[in-house]
Image (cartoon, helix red, strand yellow):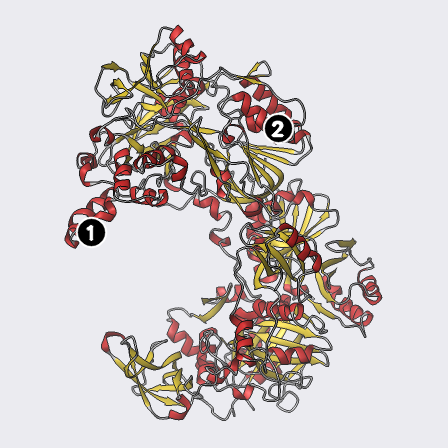
Amino acid sequence: MSKAVSALEGVSHKGFAEVAEAGLRGMITVRGDLASGAMKKAVKAATGTALPAPRRIVIDGDKAAAWMSPDELLILVPYEAAQDTVAALEKALAGEHHLVADVSDARAVFTIKGARADQVLTKLCPVDMATLAEGEIRRTRAAQVAAAFWKSEAETFTLVSFRSVAGYVMGLLETAARAGGEIA
Amino acid sequence: MLTLECPYCGVKAEETELQPGGEAHLKRYGPGSTDEEFDGYMFSRKNPKGVHFERWRHAYGCGKWFLAARCTATLEVFGTYPAQTSEPPAELQAKIKAKRPNWEGYK
Amino acid sequence: MSTRLSKGGRLIDRSKPMGFTFNGKRMQGYQGDTLASALLGADQMLVGRSFKYHRPRGIVASGAEEPNALVGLGQGGRFEPNQRVTTTELFDGAVTESQNHWPSLDFDVGAVNDKLYKFFPAGFYYKTFMFPRAAWKHVFEPIVRQSAGLGKVPTARDEDRYEYAYGFADLVIVGGGIAGLTAALSAGRKGQRVWLIEQTAHWGGRAPVDGVEIDGKPADEWVRTAVETLEKMENVTLRLRTMASGLYDHGYLLAYERVADHTPGDGRPRHRLWRMRAGHVMTATGAIERPLSFAGNDVPGVMLASAVRDYVANWAVSPGDRTVIVTNNDDAYRTALTLLEAGLAVPAVIDARPEAKGALPEAVRARGVRVLTGHGVAKVKGAKRVTGVSVCMQAGEGAEIETIACDAIAMSGGWSPVVHLWSHCGGKLTWDEDHAMFRPDPTRPATGADGAAMVTAIGSANGMLRAADAVADAHMAAGSEGTAPKAVSAEEAPMSPVWIMPEGAGPALRMKMWLDYQNDVKVSDVQLAAREGYESVEHTKRYTTLGMATDQGKLSNINGLAVLSDALHQAIPATGTTTFRPPYTPISIGAIAGEARGEIFQPLRKTPMHDWHEVHGAHWEPVGQWRRPYCYLRTGEGVHDAVNREIRAIRNSVGLLDASTLGKIIVKGPDAGRFLDMLYTNMMSTLAVGKCRYGLMCTENGFLSDDGVVARLSEDTWLCHTTTGGAERIHGWMEDWLQCEWWDWKVYTANVTEEYAQVAVAGPNARKVLEKLGGMDVSKDAHGFMEWREGTLGGFRARVYRISFSGELSYEIAVPASEGRAFWDALLAAGEEFGVTPYGTEAMHIMRAEKGFIMIGDETDGTVIPQDLNLQWAISKKKTDYLGKRAQERSYMVSPDRWKLVGLETLDGSVIPDGAYAVADGVNANGQRNMQGRVTSTYYSPTLNKGIAMGLVKHGPDRMGEVLDFPVDDGKVIKARIVDPVFYDKDGEKQNV
């Protein structure tokens, strides 16, 4: 699907941390009864992972399942796999009260890399980074817009925002990560 | 600027992550209600100096509405609880009564 | 003269000289200097002029309390006025200038005000208002304007960057003196997450200057060891140059870090505003010495005694060769010792107390210094610089006994704990009679979220003025973990409060006793205020401007309220203090703004086609945080012409509108139909799958809130379109009802607004463009009006809605946002042969007005119900309930007198101004002309070639053909006829082809 492009087409900046738009990612909002067996099976079918605990993200390679609220998950898959995953989820949840919505194109994804990557977030999000738990996904705000982030690898955070504000978010990240801005 | 713990996701959110929603536990009056009932539902709000129950939405987090019991004078927070209830949990009411013996109680 | 001493200076590095200029004069200081010490070292005692009388002003203090020494610092994009030299670190190449004088610092015309002081008493601003008007206009206003304002406003754009950072700690200790360090050691050992912040560039506070010994070591050495110990603790964060600006609810503390003020242009952010959340706060903020009120206490060369010894000990700067000490306490004798130690002369110590027999006075006497007990200062000699002091008896009226030649005076009226942070969030104070000071009342602290104390004051900030007490207090307050440090300092005899010197000073002397140096408030002003009936300290403050300058009365408040209390014949605690408000010292606007400036001042929402619009002449219109093209300007084209061109193109052929910003919310579940029936005024549950229906939403108050087209996607799924500005609000509204009222209803919602790029293809040739793209049958029979179809259009996954807001044949097509730009390009290519014209929001607005369609925000303003807009057809009569229904039954809502929607046509074809009112006969109870209607939308219609408008008019629909008067500017009246609001294609034939 060559005509699909991410909001910023992969722009990146290198300061004391490297910030980059990570391109398109398949993302699916799933709402339903998270305690149900069908939901467990649906997540397994979509990502191969277990159902995430509250405020956690379970990652398996290029797929992941994240807890967004008591009745909502976010399923992450490669962009190309989104439509098939939607179909798989719909199938698994058939007969249950649920909602599955492809939101792959409504989001922008960023990575923040470096030994001080957490400091970039410290400047933008009202979050105590020191108490961020292993595997935690934190929904909060980055300056003036909604965002969610998690530690995706050692010294790397992934941050998701709405697509329309991708330019604003990249502006925030670039400014916060600019060389000289290290918090000593 | 307040901090309130979201009872749904456990995040201790600061006020900038929350959206205020005014007085909690309003009973809706629709068609068929008297003018007085509707007026009370629509316009009459408590404004106590002391114990107050409020609606807050964890807008920049899990998106859920929750309720908070708070002292408007000292900003002490007695507790937060899910919105799917028509009155404050008995346990919370007891806790408030213990801390504020002169509180006239809920309703 | 003030000068740099050849030896000493614990904070300066003489191997690193630094050049700077003051009013163009080149000067030199050393690394470690403040601007104040560098200026004094270069014999620059005179640094500015006072606000009201333009009196010469010198440096008084050595820290944050300095009222006088404010300068303009830097140049161009780094110029900032009102920089306090005592808290500004010197850097190489600093450019400084004095303020508030004209034409020069040494010769100031405004100083004539000083001679006219009788005309500028307390409250003179207010009193001038009571003169004849002409006096204000011709006499006072020019004078006030000439002299008002401190410093110059920067004109260049700020070159620096600023940022926020969010910090979290169990305990934030404010102040890095020996109390703060002691508390940090104890709390650190306990394993608490501790932050210790200090506003200056150095740890240790006053103790090293005051000769304190801790654990058998000089304070300097103990401080070094303590800091090293703390640096090794992983749970302790130490930050210098970080000032706690304010304390707010639930432990919210703003800390202002001056990251690069002393290294400008090195690529670091200039300031960082820490938005801290503290489990608990300890204020180890120290104490501030009070001046004494004697005649001429504002002459340059009169300084706080503690500041004098700071300058000597810290920076090896002597404020004068011969310094007379004036005091009411033992502590000031330390200054005498420091001066003597440095080889400087102390001609005398004037002590207001009847006797001074403590260890410190005795030590001073032992050095051969005259100690004049029971004496006071009658008057300071000198104008731009102290030349001497005349001595009198403290108990008398000021008869001069002798004159002592000197070039500096070190004064001490006792100490006041810094209680600002303690007080910011409601902590209360108690009056300490022994030390004549307010200190924190530990029984009435500010409380936090858990109802417990949120703040503890420690050390001298808690009134523990002696080092031993301060350290013991801090150790205990922080949990007594580890061995308590033991501090030793000289014994001190009790101080004795002195609020006026001499006690019986007459009016002539009181008129020269300064309380507030920056704002020129004197003892006589406060006494006058009291005589004029001001009893409240808050009122007196505002009337006299006492404590209202940029230093916020750090030196003047206690002295001022003591004078007020005396004038009111009441005890000081009965008068009370004014309110302490953040910030403790001024913080930069840049720090308050943080990263929010320029491109990221606020979020800008962009559709996938935004860049195309930008390149193709979009004239932007802000719609919420979105930017939408208002129209597209071609070279040489004006906005009006562009809009008209776009409309004609659509009416005649085909146009494209980027409608991506419209809200799109999925509502799904067994109870979704029932839910939407409650939300919308009309019936949505009966909508057939594959069909669309226009719907209205009202608030519970009955007023129109939003509108849009709803499509039924499947048996249990609807897609609700909202207005551009309404998407988040309406989604939140839906969730509110589902979560808080009908939580047992089985409905889920999802806001998918940004998932789709949406394009309206409108105009007689719209179908041809889509057919050219191919892939879907968009014929009239296969795809009827108000229906939607899903398929692949030109290779794009598309959902096509056949709806029309323009009155033309029209399709709105949603494709995945990531493909939006490619789809837009494909439409442009396919439409080329039809002259396809991208159009903006204004063309859309005009075309909908031509069709008589309402617009949320134009026809509605939060007081309009659907019935006012003749939208009864969109209100279900079958439903027993919907949000807003009960309100719409209220007597006022059903009144036949409500203003209702009509069309308006001017008799002369002109365009009525938006918001114009139609007048009626007679006047109302307030004598104002009666009104009978107003314009809600008004445009020039290029289709009809005349002005068209919509408006709300009393009994409007029953008055078709009547002509109304709309008075506009310059006495002109526009006449407009009431007509049907549908101006174009009344039968809808064009959209239904």
The answer to which quarter of the image holds residue C769 is: bottom right
Q: Are marks 2 and 1 in contact (CB under 8 Å)?
A: no
| Depth check, front residue: C289 or A19 | C289
What chain does mark 2 sit on? C
Task: Name the element at disc 1.
Answer: loop
Residue at 45%, 88% in the rendered image: C982
Which chain contains the residue that carries disc 1? C
Residue under pointer 1: C130
Packing grade of label 2 (10 A; few <14, some 14-19, many >=20) is some
When the figure is inspected, residue C118 is found, relative to residue C954, above or below; the finding is: above
Work out whether C480 lies above or below A54.
above
Q: Position of residue B25 (x, y in %)?
A: 62, 66
Residue C776 in sight from this viewpoint:
yes
Marks 2 and 1: same chain? yes
Instruction: Kindly identify the amino acid type of the residue bearing the numbered disc 2.
Output: Met
Tell me the residue that label 2 is attached to: C476
